[in-house]
Image: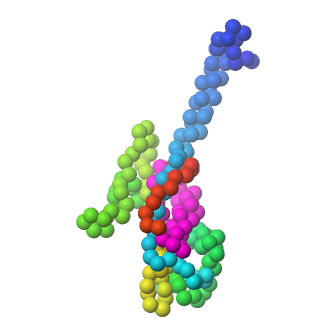
Amino acid sequence: MEVLAPQGKWSYEGLMRYYAIIFVVLLGLHGCAGPVETSIRSGGAGVHDATELMWMPVPKEEAGEGPEMLAARDAVAVALQNKGFRIVEEAPAAVAIGFAERPADIGLKAGQYEGLSAAKEERMFQNCQDRMLRLRVSIVNRANGDQLYRGEAQESHCHAQPGEVLTRLADHAIADINGPRGERSVYSLSRD
């Protein structure tokens, strides 16, 4: 079946096929409305001399971590390994992580003026409620308790689930581990 009629006009069948293709493409794009903005914040002196890290000991009453925290911990471990660090039983520096999910239209403030996370406005034609996914990594010197590094990455998502974004959040949360750079945003094409 030809899409174009011999006179150069669209045939009925060709026009219906064209509209069907457009519909399928738009339907496919519906679930991945990237680009996705990742907000990154890092601080501290940085981790320069240590190549071995350990997980921060967790009190027994808090030891029951859910599946999302375990997935976040695995993602951070892989990201650290990719940066040349090893997780061992005993090390001079300890890593603690936190993962949170909240409605994106709720902002967070630390004090009267300092905003930790701004509320996100819905986009035009958005069909679901955004959620803010946030991963924080903190590394402290075990001898004196000084914070060597703190890094966090957050993204708002409408469709994507935590398991789909934890790897990217972990990579961004520790990206500045050797030299913290403050606040910035990066964009990637991924499922929103």
Q: Residue 5: x, y in percent?
A: 70, 11
Residue occupying image coordinates x 70% and y 18%:
3
Count all numbered tags in the image, as a single digit.
0
Q: Residue furthest left?
A: 112
Q: Residue 130: x, y in percent?
A: 43, 51
Determine whether 64 is above or below 183 in the image. below
- Residue 175: in magenta span: yes
Residue occupying image coordinates x 63% and y 23%:
18
Residue occupying image coordinates x 43% and y 57%:
132
Question: Nearest the camera: 21 or 61?
Answer: 21
Question: Nearest the camera: 83 or 122?
Answer: 83
- Residue 14: in magenta span: no
Q: Residue furthest top?
A: 7
- The way the protein has been coloured in the rendering is rainbow
Q: Residue furthest right?
A: 1
Residue 55 in view, yes or no: no
Q: Residue 163: x, y in percent?
A: 56, 60
Query: Which image quadrant is residue 53 in?
Result: bottom right
Image position of 3 (left or right of 170): right
| Quadrant in the picture for the N terminus | top right
Residue stretch in magenta: 151-180
Determine whether 10 is above or below 132 in the image. above
Residue 113 in view, yes or no: yes
Determine whether 124 is above or below 176 in the image. above
Q: Residue 15: x, y in percent?
A: 63, 18
Query: Which image quadrant is residue 167 in?
Result: bottom right
Residue occupying image coordinates x 33% and y 62%:
115
